[in-house]
Amino acid sequence: MSYLDLSIREIHAAYVEKKVKPLELTKEALLRAKANQDNCFEYICEKEALEFAEKLTEVEEDNLLWGIPYVAKDNLSTKGIPTCASSNILKGYVPIYDARVIEILKEKKAVLIGKTTLDELAMGGSGMTGHLGYTYNPYDPDHKRMIGGSSCGSASATAASIVPFALGSDTGDSVRKPASYGGLVGLKPTWGRISRYGLFPFAPSMDHVGFFTRHVEDAAIVLNALSGRDDRDSTSSFKPVEDYLEATKAKKQYKVAVIPEIVDSISDKELLAEFNKTLDKLKENGACIDYVHMDPASLSSIYATYFVISCAEATSNNANLDGIKFGPYYEGNSYQEVMRKARTNGFSELIKRRFVIGSFALMSENQEELFLRAQRNRAKIVSEVNAVLKDHDFIFVPAAPSVAPLFNASGDKLSSEYLIADNHMAIGNFGGLPSITVPFALENGLPLGANITGRAFEDGEVLNFAKQVEDVTGLGGLSAKKEDR
Amino acid sequence: MKEINIDVLKDAASRLMFDMTEDQYHTLLNEFDVLTKQMATISKIEGLEKYEPMTFPFDCTVTFLREDVPVTPLSVEEALSNAGSVLNNEIKLPKVVG
Amino acid sequence: MNFEAIIGLEIHVEMRTKSKMFSPSPNAFSKEPNTHVTPLDMAFPGTMPVVNKQAVINAIRVANALHMEIDHTLYFDRKNYFYADLPKGFQITQQFRPIGKNGYLTILDKEGNPKKIHIERIHMEEDTCKQLHMASYSLLDYNRAGVPLVEIVSCPEMRNGLEAMRYVEAIRNIVVYTLTSDGKMEEGSLRCDVNVSLRPYGSDKFGTKVELKNLNSLKNIEVALDYEIARQSACLLAGTPVQQETRRFDEASGKTVLMRVKTDAVDYKYFCEPNIAPIHLSDEFVDEAIKTCPELYEDKKARYEGFGLSSTDAAIILSDIEMSRYFEKAIVNAKNIKTVANFLIVEVNGYLNKNGMAITEFPLSGDNLAKIAAYQDDGYSHKQCVDIFNYCLKEGVEPEEAKTTLKIEKQISDDGLVLSFVTEVLDANPQSIADFKAGKDRAVGFLIGQVMKAAKGKVNPGAVAKIMNEELAKR
């Protein structure tokens, strides 16, 4: 086993003990990245990574991220490194500034290995819609299963153990769903906890920077680094940052709410049996588990609410993509023609359809009935979720209704399994709540994930409970690589 | 609410500065069918008028305002490095009329 | 039939802050295109807006000067549309919660009576980039993109060109003296969109609105509106309905010309800007912004009038904020402020006009101007003081030195002394007295000349004339 397959803390210990150097692990990560067959990468920054890692000679003992290789979703701005959000409209775009999270990781001397694929402009959940085509789930060498999206490349790369952690973004469940399909820890912290400066916006009122790791403790380490106020993001919080790693240490006893309306909408019996087993283990471990009902009408409306709000915001956020200031330029006889050609050629059909839907929802004659009604419903759902969280520390439910689906699977988009079990995690985005997915079982060798959602700014508590889940399931450090053996 | 038909969708796309093929408009029209049914999950919820439309997930009101201190701007080269049509340090477009 | 004009104005004012509205780019004039740009101004993906404190302070000050209710929580909204000059594809503005609403301004109507013009709202927003149109292409300069703007929207309460002009003038005075803007209409830092419609007197319905653009001076507002009112009136009398359209003022002909007919209104799909968290303005913050607001135009004018200046003279000095700054410096140690004001208005302005100079380039300090004015108050003739003034400017010397070099001596205005000279001259010229009595006014001039000669020019001609007339009357 390579050091690269270990946890961040273990790699750090190896650096401190001079058993291995960042340059060696960087080279290995690059080798794995280049050998990757799952379409994880938009760009592998070999030259930049080697130059950066070469300079890392004096280990910083108090800096756990020193020399740790990582990858970032290609919707995070990286100065001098092409960033296209897996869309042809940004083909060839080379940002002139770093996102705050990239800047922090540079300061921490973590080594950026590459930029990863996503659903085009982060608008999707399958990992099938990026301009480079499908991104595959490393648990299925036959390339028949999705890893999920939109942070598909980051999830796939972490699950394949190319890097110990990977940055993503989460607007509906774009980190937490692929984490479930990839057997990963996927954290979307409280809205405002991590600066979004430099994250290409999809729907800012629900956008979060999130990330994947293979250990809960690693998630705490990364959150420690990335959290904090940034004056360039007006929505980043002034609330003091706690030590999240410390927060995971002492096992705490929590009151946990399981929502039967979500669990019962799942048809996979094996999944449900495994989930119940996990609940039993958690009870034995001291957790107080309650079944708390929520209004099924509210839960069924999450998807539509999310869809309307996110499409509406997206149509506006992506109006800057017109080929004039960046992205491929097309000649024309008028500025309108220039823009029209760039946008017609640059966006895929799916994106265009979503923009039309979003724009339709914002039209003055529709806005009250569609957009504002969705925003009102968001408020109602958030108040119902917060009511549950008043008496309980977390909501704990399966993150997805199944293992990673087959690419060709087609489901009923109006079934409650789809509307509720497949889309409930957007409540974390509606309310800006800290929310984490952790693996709880394997079903025929494919991982299943559970989701924990807590109160705003109680990211430490969420991590503490996630650690307990990891401990009772014994699935810490899971990777597709290990499964291969 | 506006009636949804091909012409409305074409007009909306045109105002968003892109074109789609006839087939794509039909796919979109069909998508609106599903969407309308999904939207019904919201429209049947009662008492929504009691709720203010939510933009921010929780009260995140701040008092912070940026001090009025300019930073060093980008160099012209940097600012225009990604632009596909440049003339004499400016972006060049076909003549803008109206 | 007689028509009543209904006029409303939307005024955009570019703020003279040091940085832009939502980005920290320098906000300053630059001849070099695209040199005042940071990533947000060109809408690079992932950039985020952060509100400029000084822009908020300025908006509060203007809102307060306009007697508005100030919203203590700031929200921003997106106005979505595509245009060549709009980098983000939307403009950040305050559609739903303007920082100020329900204010008013008092102007003088045609008859000189005070008239209250109500103001609907004032809000903050950002400017677009600048387009330079060439024969076959256009160039984009992002230096202006993101420059802070305040937009002030009046209620449609003005009735003629003069009122509209006075309203704009009053707004300009407010934004200039709160140091919000330089208020230069010619340079586009204060831009007016005027809406005008006509309706028969007594009607409470509004007619079709026409929008006027390109009104880049106060005078043009009056001329354009008067022309447009006459045009619409003629249309209506001829039975031709007024079209909903946008018209441009053509300065050369003094007429308004059709730019475009308004078809369907653009749907801007406004919604709340999710990237700017609501900002609470504490009472202390708002109060401090108001308390530290520089003296307003109207207050300055009242203060100047208190010095004995006429309303016209005060207005002349205040027509240029730099002129008023110079004036304020000059009068710090001045005994007779009115004399200083007269020198400033006549001599200084004359010099500036002749040399095509701005007051900021005027070489004589305010202190020195006050010294020269003080000589006049001290008994030196106006002409002598003007000589000193001109010599100071020509040679670049202090007033004392000019006076010495020019050998200027104080004239006698002591009545007793003057009388003795007058008596002496009258006694010596009986024929002139006779001529005067016979109605020859010229004789007085001759006699005064004789006195000046006898006194070697050291008597004050005013005093001589006064006493000469008194003495002639006695003989």
Image (cartoon, coloured by chain):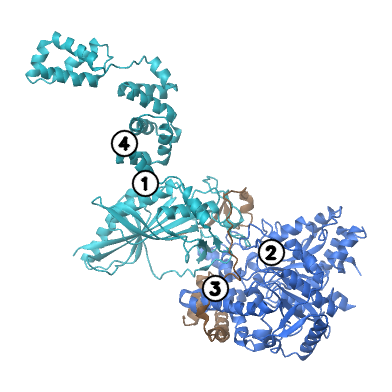
Q: Residue at x 33, y 32 (%)?
A: C338
Q: Residues within 10 Å of mark 2 (few under 14, many from 20)?
A: many
Image position, residue A299 (x, y; %):
63, 84
Residue at image mark 1: C298
Image height check: is C126 above or below A31?
A: above
Foreground residue among C107 and C70: C70
Q: CA distance from mark 1 to mark 3?
A: 56 Å
From the image, state the color of chain C: cyan
Residue A102 is left or right of residue C186, and the answer is right
Picture quadrant of residue A96: bottom right
Pick the quarter of the image with the N terminus of chain A.
bottom right
Near mark 4 (Cα within 10 A), the count class, few <14, some 14-19 or many ≥20, is some
Determine which of the numbered discs, if any, sits on residue B19 in the image: 3
Which amino acid lies under the numbered mark 2 shown in the image of this protein?
Ile
Query: Circle 3 sits in a helix, a strand or a loop, which is it?
Result: loop
In the rendered structure, find residue C308 and report the number of the disc placed on it.
Answer: 4
| CA gap, disc 4 and disc 2 | 63 Å
Is label 4 in contact with label 1 (beta carbons under 8 Å)? no
